């Protein structure tokens, strides 16, 4: 296939990359992006959604990470504050916190209020941290108790 052929769109303006991103086909995504980086900037879904956003929408984490790492920090083509904010929100909704953190680091002025609302409805997102605090407290208690037993009174 020629590089320009990869930019062909169907009636809904979806490229092959857009469809592969929606399906979560990481192998196809890698092949197409390596052949034509411009595909990352062509909006599909009736010209409303970037391929990276649709991958996030469907929870295709491997595709999202790969595409974000090749997205030039969302500076190319159709990326604007509004759809960057949508991407950030979907990353948080789908527990893709590493990508969300990269977005917030690059664009600290994005609508973090809505992100905080989503996080407030996701207490399970902080489960590991709570368990870590509890396990550290228990471990500290055990150390303290063993020192009390070994210290003459």
Image: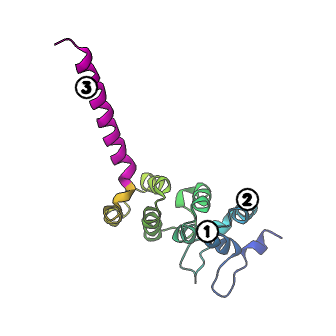
Look at the image and give the residue range highlighted in magenta: 126-153
- Residue in the picture at 62% in, 57% down: 66
Quadrant for residue 23, please give it.
Answer: bottom right
Q: CA distance from mark 1 to mark 2?
A: 14 Å
Circle 1 residues within 10 Å: few <14, some 14–19, many ≥20: some
Residue under label 1: 41
Residue under label 3: 145
In the image, residue 65 above or below residue 25: above
Residue 34 is labelled as: 2
Q: Percent from the top left, x then y, of residue 45?
A: 58, 81
Q: Secondary structure at mark 3?
A: helix
Circle 2 residues within 10 Å: few <14, some 14–19, many ≥20: few
Q: CA distance from mark 1 to mark 3?
A: 60 Å
Disc on the earlier residue, 1 or 3: 1
- Residue in the picture at 45% in, 55% down: 97
Disc on the earlier residue, 3 or 2: 2
Q: Percent from the top left, x then y, of residue 122?
A: 36, 62
Quadrant for residue 143, please give it.
Answer: top left
Query: Which of 73/95 is in front?
Result: 95
Q: CA distance from mark 3 to mark 2?
A: 59 Å
Residue 151 lies in the magenta-colored region = yes
- Residue in the picture at 36% in, 53% down: 126
Residue 150 lies in the magenta-colored region = yes
């Amino acid at each position: 296939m020629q590089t320009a052929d990869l930019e062909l769109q169907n009636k809904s303006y979806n490229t092959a990359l857009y469809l592969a991103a929606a399906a979560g086909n990481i192998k196809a995504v890698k092949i197409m992006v390596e052949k034509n980086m411009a595909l990352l900037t062509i909006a599909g879904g009736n010209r409303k959604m970037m391929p990276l956003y649709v991958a996030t929408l469907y929870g295709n984490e491997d595709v999202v990470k790969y595409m974000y790492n090749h997205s030039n920090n969302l500076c190319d083509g159709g990326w604007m504050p509004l759809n960057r904010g949508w991407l950030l929100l979907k990353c948080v909704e789908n527990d893709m916190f590493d990508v969300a953190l990269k977005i917030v680091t690059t664009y600290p002025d994005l609508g973090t209020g809505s992100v905080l609302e989503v996080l407030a409805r996701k207490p399970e997102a902080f489960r590991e941290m709570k368990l870590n605090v509890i396990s550290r407290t228990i471990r500290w208690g055990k150390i303290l108790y063993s020192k009390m037993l070994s210290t003459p009174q």
